[in-house]
Amino acid sequence: MNKKKITIINCGSGNILSIKRAFEKWNVEVSIADKKEEILSASRLVLPGVGAFSHAMQNLKSIGFFDAIYSSKFKEIPLLGICLGMQLLFEESEEFGKFKGLDLIKGKVIKLPELSSNKKKLKIPSIGWNQLILSKNALTGNNSNFFKKFDKDNAFYFVHSYFSNPINKDCILASYNFGGHLIPSIVANNNIIGCQFHPEKSGAPGLNLIKNFISL
Amino acid sequence: MKKSRLIARLDIKNSNLIKSINLEGLRIVGDPNLFAKKYYQNGVDELIFMDCVATLYGRNNLSSIIEDATKDIFIPITVGGGIRTLEDVKNLLNSGADKVAVNTAAVKNPSFISEIANSIGSQSLVLSIEAKKKDNNAWEVYTSNGRDPTGLKVYDWIKKATKLGIGEILLTSVDREGTQKGFDVELMSMATGITDVPIIASGGLGTIEHLKDVINFGRVDAVAIADAIHYNRIMINELKKTITTIATNE
């Protein structure tokens, strides 16, 4: 049987190896793409990312990713954006100024709230393990297979100071509780899924989500 | 209260996992990755690999150990010891580290902190502070694995480094490290009182009570454990259970 193929988009992010290793756990062939052609011939794409928004966007520009997303072929390829890779999917980010994103999901990337719902100061960046609260449409929408074997007690590893805020709330499939605020943690728009947390660093529950993405 | 993270700390010398007392007198424990994999499977939240002799030899030698670790370990990994340049940082991240911990080079040149933060983001930058208690409730910063005094007050260094853009602080009490006498709770509570960045308490766990004290009174965000788990004195699931109970009761 042919191995399934995963293509990681090289946006200059430092955590590509960890993501590659997590996919390889499920016996798939992983390649790293830094050309438009490689991106468009992929069967599944992963957009990683740690670090600054503007820096990652520049790198994506230089490898021709912008041309790729306007191709009709692109709309058929399942894409998983991880952490900053999820934030890049949005219209714009407020991190260190105002920067345009990929505009694949409508909405902005904004700073985490500084105060909890009962007005206590919150620690930013938000670092740690959080349980997810699934939206109603998570298990009924067209990405429901992404949640196969999902257990509500599972926690996932987050580290972020900014979060993505989709205009269309139906895009939000899961959130976590940050000082009483619900922070979008998994978003989706057709073939595109984004995770604010790091599935490749969230132990067995994270590896399970990666497995689910491979079989979407 | 937010659940504190449980971190396994692995101090390494020449590719061996070692254990020290007051950061001195090193004993070999075994192959670091055998221990790391066991801790991952037993459910720790993160791992810290610290090259103890790197500053002495001028370079961090952990890349190959980390590359090996990431084949089977899928939780955040912090690497420290002997990191002097941005290139060192990038090499370690490319080997699979998620965060780097700096100490000596940052004390010598504080702008190194902002240089790293600007390049890879604060979230991947841990400041490692080795603190020794002086008179009148003040602590001094040491470098080179607890060997060299700096004259710098821990209080001032935390204040300054917070402004420069660190993402977390690994705060090791040199006095308590390896002694099993409990964490330096006063040191931890001073630190959590003056900065908003997460504090990882390190050094001194002997009993479960020590863990409760450092979370309840030190208010730390994470706890780094070494010899207590290397020598199976305390089980990881017992530590985890205690942390969960504290988080739910408050």
Image (tube, rainbow, N blue to C red):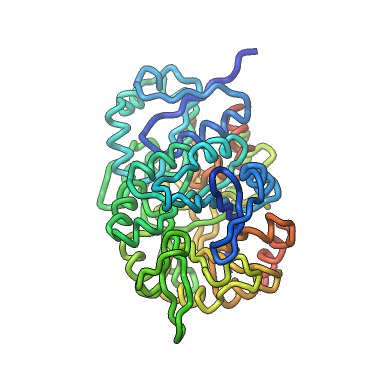
Q: Among all residues in the image, which is located at the extreme front?
A: B25
Q: Position of residue B184 (x, y in %)?
A: 56, 75
Q: Among all residues in the image, which is located at the extreme left?
A: A97
Evaluate whether residue A205 shows in this view: no
For the image, the number of numbered tags is 0
Q: Position of residue B171 (x, y in %)?
A: 49, 66
B192 vs A170: above or below: below
A47 vs B203: above or below: above
B229 vs A34: above or below: below
Q: Position of residue A161 (x, y in %)?
A: 41, 55
Q: Quadrant of the N terminus of chain A?
A: top right
A127 vs A143: above or below: below
The structure residue drawn at horizontal position 59% and vertical position 51%, both measured from the top left corner, is A132
Q: Quadrant of the C terminus of chain A?
A: top right
Front-lying residue, B149 or A34: B149
Front-lying residue, A32 or B1: A32
